[in-house]
Amino acid sequence: MILDKRLKNAIPSLVSIIRIILAPLFLIAFLENNLILSIVIYIIAVATDAIDGHLARILDSVTPLGAYLDITADLILILTGFVAFTINGIYHYWILILIIIMFLQFIITSKFKVPVYDPIGKYYGAFLFLVIFITLIADIFHNSYSNYVLLILIVIFTVISLISRLFFIIKLKIQTKNK
């Protein structure tokens, strides 16, 4: 059976929407100190990130709208994780501002077309997913020292990612001019 093109394009997006739906459930579970449920919800949500991209490729349904929905779902999950940690005093509020700035610079430098991934920046979201997971695990063991290390790593990785993005965009502009 051949899937209708609209349905093929919708399937990966629906998986991304699941991630958006899981984000507030994660927040509620975390704020209610149900760490095990928080971790389970979070793992399922992160799994949808791998699944939606895989489905988009195998269904040949990669679209700019789907790509931005995926990135937006990532941002919502990441921000939700850091909002939860900020509310609990694990991280400071400025980390949220930093993450929003990174997302905005990605959108602006992609010029609202198909997202442009620089070599390091494409791993930034995965890095933040990992930071959230490690923070959850550290919270179970009441290990706050790891949070300081993670905070330093977030700042370092953010600066490296911003520099990488800048050089990558400059390189693209030079290549475009030379064509």
Image (spheres, grey):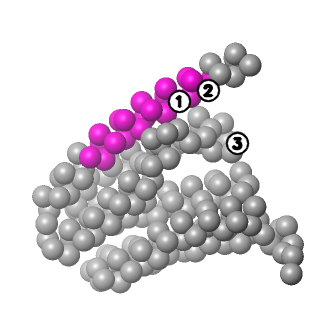
Residue 154 belongs to the span the image colors magenta? yes
Total marks placed: 3
The location of residue 60, given as percent across then percent down, is: 75, 61
Between marks 2 and 3, how big is the CA–CA gap? Answer: 15 Å
Question: Badge 1 is on which residue?
Answer: 168
Residue type highlighted by circle 3: Lys
The residue range painted magenta reads 153-173
Horizontal side of 71 relative to 146 (left or right) equals right
Q: CA distance from mark 2 to mark 1?
A: 6 Å
At horizontal 66% and vertical 72% (from top left) the residue drawn is: 14
In-image side of 1 versus 35 (left or right): right
On screen, residue 147 versus residue 97, left or right, reads left
- Which of marks 3 and 1 precedes in the sequence? 3
Residue 142 % position (x, y): 14, 71
Tell me if I can see residue 87 in this picture.
Answer: no
Q: Are marks 2 and 1 in contact (CB under 8 Å)?
A: yes
Secondary element at tag 2: helix
Q: Nearer the viewer, residue 175 or 92?
A: 175
Question: How far is mark 1 from mark 3, CA to CA?
Answer: 16 Å
In the rendered image, residue 117 lying in the magenta stretch gets the answer: no
Could you classify mark 3 by the number of other residues whose Cα lies within 10 Å: few (under 14), some (14-19), or many (20 or more)?
some
Q: Main secondary structure of the magenta part?
A: helix
What amino acid is at disc 2? Leu
Residue marked by disc 3:
113
Residue 22: percent from the left, percent from the top? 50, 75
Mark 1 nearby-residue class (10 Å; few <14, some 14–19, many ≥20): some
